[in-house]
Image: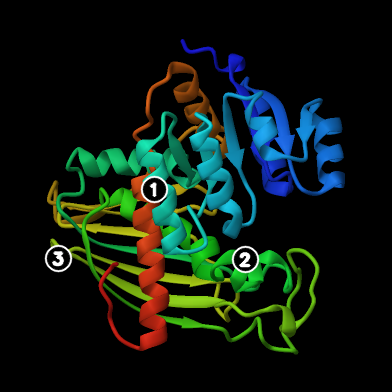
């Protein structure tokens, strides 16, 4: 068994997400060795909590670690990921791969020639029911999968207006690039990442720009409508070259019940996956006795997807093997779909992937 405790892991960007990742690293037996952030208070907090060395300069930290987790705001991914790869390190970068398609493509170009590897942090793939459902699909239990409905909808869940999440120059987008990226990734993963032919979409900004935006809880501070210049919901339809399709509903805020449901439709069976509670039901029909519908609830062991992702990453760093999951190429495909959603919304017509 690979000893992941020997991997000296560094963290770039020491905000809340870095702490989440660091906690999971410790839970799976990894080592939090170092961290870097431009903010002195963030460095001091991280050093105290994890007894880790901290650096103001990322390149200085790169000399003392074997791999890094990058969890900065999106627009800084390219700088830190490419520098780490060029320093010979393995990298796990938080989703999305970048804030723009052009930046994501530059990361992919550097990763292709790098000694180390780069993984993209789509942790939902590591959920037990997602793994079960993907294997059912691969084994032919569902027959030919023709369509997937993917939802990531919050009734009210706009991140703090004025934070980097709601500033396009830093994030690259709003609800699509923040939470829609998860729904897109899981759906494409369950379809085996098919070739995408066309995307038709509509993006909206209905609640974030509203001075009278009403909510129960705000994720972070609220600077009001002036701190919001991104989308807060979107609807998209994706057509694959082989005729399969994907529909997407994503929202930070909307007047409907929340949903993190993935619905898979095949000609031999289907499935309903709810990532909010990790429930999975497989749907089919049978003629045993008499014709009837059959709904099978699948029970899986409790497991923390972030921890499984970190363990997978560290095992591949320790072994020197290149991971087959969450690759840069897959992250780039997700980025291209998101880019097409935004272009389609702006043009008011279907577009091809670039």
Tell which circle, 2 or 1, labels the residue nearer the N-terminal end. 1
Query: Residue at label 3?
Result: 243
**In the image, what residue occupies the spot 34% across and 56% down?**
333
Q: Is residue 304 visible?
A: yes
Who is closer to the viewer here, 312 or 134?
A: 312
Decide if residue 16 is on the left or right side of residue 199. right
Decide if residue 276 is on the left or right side of residue 281. right
The relative height of residue 70 versus residue 215 in the rendered view (above or below) is: above
The disc at residue 138 is none
Query: Residue at label 2?
Result: 170
Quarter holding the C terminus is bottom left
The relative height of residue 336 versus residue 324 in the rendered view (above or below) is: below
Residue 223 sits in quarter: bottom right
Cα separation, mark 3 vs mark 1, equals: 28 Å
Tell which circle, 2 or 3, labels the residue nearer the N-terminal end. 2
The relative height of residue 59 versus residue 227 in the rendered view (above or below) is: above
Query: Residue at label 1?
Result: 108
Q: Secondary structure at mark 3?
A: loop
Cα separation, mark 2 vs mark 1, equals: 20 Å
């Amino acid at each position: 068994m690979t000893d992941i405790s020997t991997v000296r892991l560094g963290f770039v960007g020491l905000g809340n997400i870095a702490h989440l990742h660091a906690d999971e690293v410790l839970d799976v037996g990894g080592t939090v060795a170092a961290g870097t952030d431009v903010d002195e208070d963030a460095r001091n907090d991280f050093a105290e909590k994890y007894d880790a060395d901290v650096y103001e300069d990322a390149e200085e930290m790169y000399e003392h670690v074997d791999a890094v987790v990058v969890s900065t705001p999106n627009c800084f991914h390219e700088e830190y990921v490419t520098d780490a790869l060029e320093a010979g390190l393995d990298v796990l970068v938080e989703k999305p791969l970048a804030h723009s398609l052009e930046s994501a493509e530059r990361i992919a170009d550097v990763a292709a020639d790098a000694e180390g590897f780069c993984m993209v942090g789509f942790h939902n793939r590591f959920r037990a029911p997602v793994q079960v459902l993907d294997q059912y699909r691969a084994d032919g239990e569902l027959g030919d999968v023709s369509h997937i409905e993917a939802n990531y909808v919050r009734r009210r869940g706009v991140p703090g207006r004025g934070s980097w999440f709601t500033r396009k120059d830093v994030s690259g987008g709003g609800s699509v690039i923040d939470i829609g990226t998860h729904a897109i990734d899981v759906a494409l993963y369950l379809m085996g990442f098919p070739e995408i032919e066309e995307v038709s979409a509509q993006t909206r900004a209905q609640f974030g720009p509203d001075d009278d935006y009403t909510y129960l809880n705000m994720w972070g501070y609220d600077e009001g409508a002036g701190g919001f210049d991104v989308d807060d919901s979107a609807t998209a339809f994706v057509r694959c070259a082989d005729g399969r399709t994907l529909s997407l509903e994503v929202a930070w805020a909307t007047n409907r019940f929340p949903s993190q449901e993935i619905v898979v439709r095949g000609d031999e069976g289907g499935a309903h996956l709810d990532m909010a509670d990790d429930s999975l039901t497989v749907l089919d029909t049978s003629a045993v006795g008499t014709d009837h519908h059959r709904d099978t609830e699948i029970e899986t062991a409790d497991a923390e997807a972030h921890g499984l992702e970190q363990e997978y990453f560290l095992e591949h760093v320790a072994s020197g093997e290149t991971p087959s999951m969450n690759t840069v190429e897959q992250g780039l495909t997700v980025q291209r779909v998101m880019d097409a959603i935004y272009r389609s919304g702006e043009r008011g017509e279907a577009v091809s992937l670039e």
